Amino acid sequence: MGDDQKVTSRPKFLRTVQGILTNESLWRTIAIQLVAVLLALLIGAILILLSGANPLRAYGALFQGSLGTVRAIGRTLEKATPLIFSGLAVAFAFKAGLFNIGAQGQLLFGAITSAVLGFAIKGLPPVIHIFVALFGGALAGGLYAVIPGALKAFRGASEVIVTIMLNYIAINTTDFLSDGPWKDTAAGNIVARTPQILDSARIPNLGGIPFGFFIAVLVAIFIWWLLYKTTIGFEIRTVGISPHAARYAGIKVAQTVILTMVISGLLAGMGGAVETQGVVYRYQPGFNVGLGFDGITIAMLGKTHPFGAIPAALLVGAMKAGASEMQFSSGVAKEITDVIQALILFFVAADVIVRSLLRIRERGEEVKLSSGWGKQ
Amino acid sequence: MTTLSQPLPTWQRFLIRNRTSLIVAVVLFVLVIIGYIRDPNVTTAVLASTVRHATPLVLGALCGLMGERAGVINIGIEGQMLMSAFIGFLANVYTGNLFLAVLAGILTGAILGALLAFMSVTLKIDQIIGGTVINILALGLTGYFYTAGLTTEGKLSMIALGPLADIPLIGPVLFNNPPITYATIVLVFLVHYLLFHTKWGLRTRAVGEHPRAADTVGINVYMMRYANVIIGGGIAGLAGAFLTLEAVGSFERAMTNGRGFVALAVMLFGKYTPIGAWGAALLFGFFSAIQTQLQFGGTIIPHQFIGMLPYLVTIIVLAGFVGRTHVPAADGVPYKKE
């Protein structure tokens, strides 16, 4: 290693690239995930046939609506942006053996908080206002995730059930806030929604590409660094593989569990904020539905790796972007994309099926989630 | 600790072991009596609504505990209920036969149970992921195939049990209900008998506590797990049928509204016993009934906060009680034959 360090960074970078290109297990993983997606699309096609429509036309329209034009590609990137965040949120918690189904609730709090910071704070310079609202939203999501983290760490309450219940509580609370104290008081408004955020808090589009997408990619790189290049990340991953071993090694498991949930919540909250500031420009109940749940599929499809979340979110984002076009020109209901997503999740989780199809045996290390209720 | 040398009589041990539940039951009983004296109509309405709210919860909890007693965690109950509610509703729309519709609901739940068993027993997928697959799949499929405006002939109606239904308070609450509500009460005792007084139940619990030992004495671990998860699925299917065929009479998107997850808290609160789950479900049902009553009564509390009540109670129960109950030792662990 001593000699290697003296070499300048450029060859090292090239070596990394070469390492990725020749990494057989990486390509194998990609192949498995792609086949899982294809199988899901195949079953989706059968369902479309069953409902009396033409699957080829439907998929053609789906493709056209998501990648067919420059505008469509922009829309795909826009849809993928919050999904990268929720995918990262779920994947990050997975690393510590935690299943954060509550990304949805944390995302809602992030979305409404950034909306409030966006319309209530006046006179901030644009760039600063964007980041104040963005980090404010993230913080709200992170704080909300303290509850399941602490209950898991100190009471052993399953974070799965607690976060699902907190999702319902978040829906009710944000409904109340956007219909009560933070309701849009503009003349003629009767629906529950906040006022529009100021221009200074809006995340711009750079040449058709939403700037939020770049933020998402940067955050993914940061999460990768945190997980694989820092002590905290090492501790989180150790807790995920074996809490007992982690405790024996002197890692404070309870603290690590809470910290992991908080970071996961921060990510989900930022996802909500980026959607508010880049797309919706206000908080309105029903506008963020499902973004957090999609994080589960995205995390699994991306093999719970921070970089895996980006292509996975692009795929799901493309389906969302093209769904309207598909419904319009082939008459197939938008909801088929939810079914396809569920099927993707199934085939990705049941990778045994795909592996036997591709005749691949080996299986990597896995984080266990179902350790029973409350046992640690 | 002095009692070690001199064992207590059975009834005393029963009192000590269940003191919290007994205190809660006595307090609620007194409250009900006071309520009945002050306003008989509202009290009867709240209690009848308690039983109705409790029905899908106790059925879901029965599904959950059958699986977990055999070592399979089922967080897909929500999806099983939703899908069964939908299929049961469609069967009612197209056949007009409520009995067939209920059967279709039960069958749907059982099929999803078989899918969960396939994923967690045969494929050995993480069971939490397996359940999540079922939940997301049910949400997607019901959303895709749902068409607005379907109507039905009607829903399951009340059956008054003769003179029993005329007893004040108890009559309208317990003896004047639609069929699935009666079936639920029967199922509670049936599952209790099955789990604790039959060879089948002994084998199920053995498989959930120590599959290796069970395998050694010749019990088919995979078969027991499949069977319990599938039967449980059928029971969750009945809960789904209850929602569309008995309670509401129509289907709405995502109409289960978290009941499948609340059922898991009910199961834990009831310490993995059918009768305990029934008590817990009645308690949850009582909170939901009060919530409904408050919303009708008109209070200064915003309805969103009242609506949160069952979910808040679930979290509190989970945080407060989970450490005090014995979870089957092999819960959530796939079994690999050697």
Image (tube, helix red, strand yellow):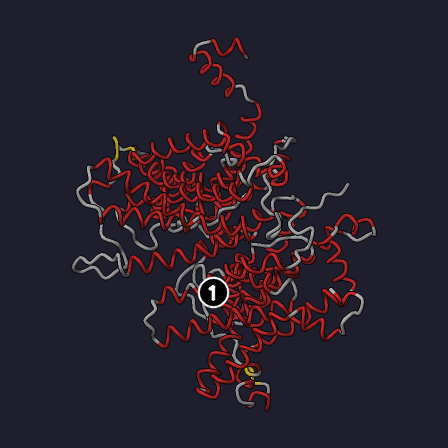
Q: Chain of mark 1?
A: B
Say which quarter of the image contains residue B309: bottom left
- Answer whether residue B257 is visible to the viewer in this image: yes
Q: Residue shown at 38%/38% (left/top)? A: A80
For the point 42% across and 34% down, the residue is A310
Q: Amino acid at mark 1?
A: Pro
Quarter of image, res B325? bottom right
Residue B87 pos. (x, y %):
52, 62
- Please name the residue shown 51% across and 71% down the image: B285
Q: Is residue A322 visible?
A: no
Q: B246 left or right of A200?
A: right
Q: Position of residue A306 (x, y in %)?
A: 46, 33
Callout 1 crowding tier (Cα within 10 Å): few <14, some 14–19, many ≥20: many
Find numbered disc 1 in the image and state the secondary structure of the residue it sits on: helix
Q: Please state the horizontal and vertical placement of residue A318, each as a whole percent of the image.
A: 39, 39
Q: Residue A93, position in %: x, y?
A: 50, 41
Q: Which residue is mark 1?
A: B310
Quarter of the image with the N terminus of chain A in it: top right
Q: Relative to A223, is A47 above or below?
A: below
Asked if residue A251 lies left or right of residue B328, the reply is left
Q: Which residue is more in the foreground, B290 or A274?
A: B290
Could you tell whether B235 is left or right of B261 in the image?
right
Tell me how many marks there are. 1
Direction right: furthest residue: B217
